[in-house]
Image (cartoon, rainbow, N blue to C red):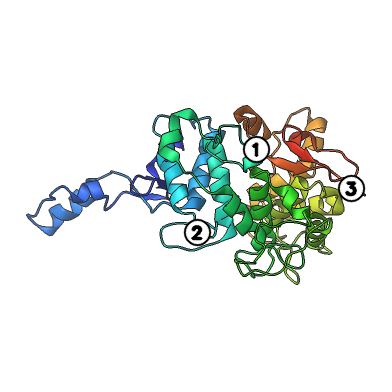
Amino acid sequence: IVDWVFDCYDPRTGGFGGNCSQRQHPQRLARQPPTDNDQNQRQFLLNDETPCPHDGHLLYTLSALQILAIAGKLNDPRLDKPAIAAFISSLQNEDGSFSGDEWGEVDTRFSYCALSSLALLGCLPLPNDDHDEEGNDGCDDKYKEATKPVIDIKKAVSYILSCRNFDGGFGSIPGAESHAGQVFCCIGALSIAHSLHLLNDENNDTDPKNTHGGNASPGGRAGADLLSWWLAERQCDSGGLNGRPEKQADVCYSWWILSALSIMGRVDWINRKKLGQFILNCQDDDDGGIADRPGDMPDVYHTFFGLAGLSLIGFLGDVGEKEGRVYREVDPVFALPVDVVRGMGLKAQVVSGMDGRVDERLKSYSVLDGSSGR
């Protein structure tokens, strides 16, 4: 798996593609194939096994880094960290947003991918109040020269906040409809950037002139709690969660919503027992995989998110106690096993519950007071 991931690295851009082909590699094109006849030409192409990566993209770059993190291979000599950091840096736009690749699509998903990737690389700059006196940008000394400037973190945070709507949710771009998937991306990115406190900042002046053109967003105490209430309202009669109003429940939102609620200390705002039963109802009796909803075909995508959701509501821990086994817990910020996150020393910002308590898996992070009346 690790070798295949590296085959997907695109040295032309510095990022990872979603797959690799065995045909038409640029290095192969530099060689002269046989010209005797068509049969020899076809055989030459079939015999060329040099992997050709697809175009680098932020989505696949983060996925590649997450796989390497789980495999303990982020220090593999094949990983060109300065080139990856430069690739991410090149995709930040003047307004702080990120394009997914050179073709320019902008989406808050890419903001999360950029910040999470840089955190995994050890190259994430934080706002000035988290810098040392010399203005350390967070990069390892070994990569400082190659990765400066990495990104403008303040502009990145400002852009994310400009995508917040009147209902408390976040969209893909300023003014776009609130969507639970985008909420995770924005809350996760703000958590990694140590900027969650801006959700409740009545004097938040990150974009005082509304230069991004988004909707007026709520500040003050209503900021985080209004968003948490919007997320809690995504629970349907079946116990499952949907991504937007009037949509069907889907197992994948067990991750997108629970992760955001976990970061903000509000998981108890939904009925965890009903959600857990919904996820179990989506498991296929024959092959064991999990589908988007009961009766549908299971797939790897929904199986991962279903298991992640069961982890976040504590179901896997309860099962483990009965079986005498210990199941790895998922971290809601980085979507990685908690032991991997702690082993790497990754940092983030989270909010305590209304009773002041903090999920055990989040205690290594900076904690904001989310207790009632504060």
Identity, as a three-letter code, of the amino acid under mark 2 = Glu
**Residue underneath mark 1:** 130
For the residue marked with disc 3, what is the amino acid? Arg
The residue under the point 63% across, 30% down is 345
Can residue 287 be seen here? The reply is no
Q: Position of residue 212 (x, y in %)?
A: 60, 66
Q: CA distance from mark 3 to mark 2?
A: 36 Å
10 Å neighbourhood of mark 3: few (<14), some, or many (≥20)? few
Sequence-first tag of 2 and 1: 2
Q: Residues within 10 Å of mark 2 (few under 14, many from 20)?
A: few
Give x and y (percent) for residue 299.
Answer: 60, 53
Q: Which residue is mark 3?
A: 374
Q: Give the residue number, with chain letter if any, for mark 2.
A: 94
Front residue of 170 and 306: 170
Q: Position of residue 353 (x, y in %)?
A: 85, 44
Q: Residue furthest front?
A: 133
Q: Which labelled disc corresponds to residue 96?
A: none
Q: Is residue 153 above or below residue 218?
A: above
Q: Is 135 left or right of 313, judged from the image as shown?
A: left
Q: On the rendered structure, is 310 left or right of 74?
A: right
In the image, which is nearer the foreground, mark 1 or mark 3?
1
Determine whether label 3 and label 2 are within 8 Å by CB: no
Looking at the rendered structure, the kind of residue marked 1 is Asp
Asked which secondary structure carries label 1, the reply is: helix
Q: Hey, which residue is sitting farthest left in the picture?
A: 36
> Is the residue 139 above or below the residue 216 in the image?
above
Query: Which numbered disc flags the more N-terminal residue, 3 or 2?
Result: 2
Q: Is residue 125 left or right of residue 367?
A: left
Q: CA distance from mark 1 to mark 3?
A: 23 Å
Q: Which residue lies at the image location 60% right of the left edge and 30% below the top edge?
A: 344
Q: Earlier in the sequence, mark 1 or mark 3?
A: 1
